[in-house]
Amino acid sequence: MQIQVNTDHNVHGGERLAAHVTTGLEESLSRFGGWLTRVEVHLGEDGGAGPEDKKCVIEARPGGKQPVAVTHHAATVDDAYTGATHKLVRALETRYDRAHDHKGSASIRHMPAPEEPEIG
């Protein structure tokens, strides 16, 4: 899995920030390591003057599937990154489970019919 971190000119941190984000994503997405081919992280300012003007967009690319993208706004870059990571993990869990457990899961059609109670 390749992880690429991009920042706009308003976000400071350089290599240290990129290393922190990369390490955190590798840990959070380890379950999907063989399934994901690439993850792109975009950290920046939203342009607003409000309290939650930092944003993080993370796009994950599962092999052979459509990309999954999430966005989170927060007051700090770290909070925006953390929120986006949580959203991404939830979205990937849903998509991964659908893709891998679709046919092999138990179905109500295959369960035995309930027995009729005896009337005495």
Image (cartoon, rainbow, N blue to C red):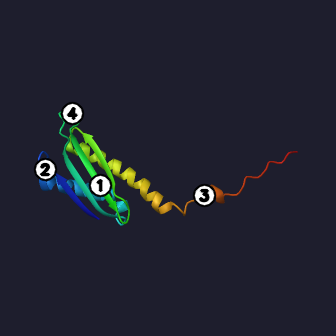
Determine which residue is flagged by label 1: 59
Distance from Cα at disc 2 to Cα at disc 1: 21 Å
Q: Quadrant of the C terminus?
A: top right
Distance from Cα at disc 2 to Cα at disc 3: 50 Å
Q: Position of residue 72 (x, y in %)?
A: 28, 44
Q: What is the count of numbered marks?
A: 4
Task: Residue 48: name its quadrant.
Answer: top left
Residue 59 placement, left or right of 102: left
- N-terminal of the pair, mark 1 or mark 4, is 4
Marks 2 and 3: which is nearer the front? 3
- N-terminal of the pair, mark 2 or mark 3, is 2
Marks 2 and 4: which is nearer the front? 4
For residue 107, which numbered disc appears in the image? 3
For residue 49, which numbered disc appears in the image? none
Determine which residue is flagged by label 2: 13
State the SS at label 3.
Answer: loop
Q: What's under tag 3, amino acid-wise?
A: Ser
Q: Are marks 2 and 1 in contact (CB under 8 Å)?
A: no
Q: What's under tag 1, amino acid-wise?
A: Glu
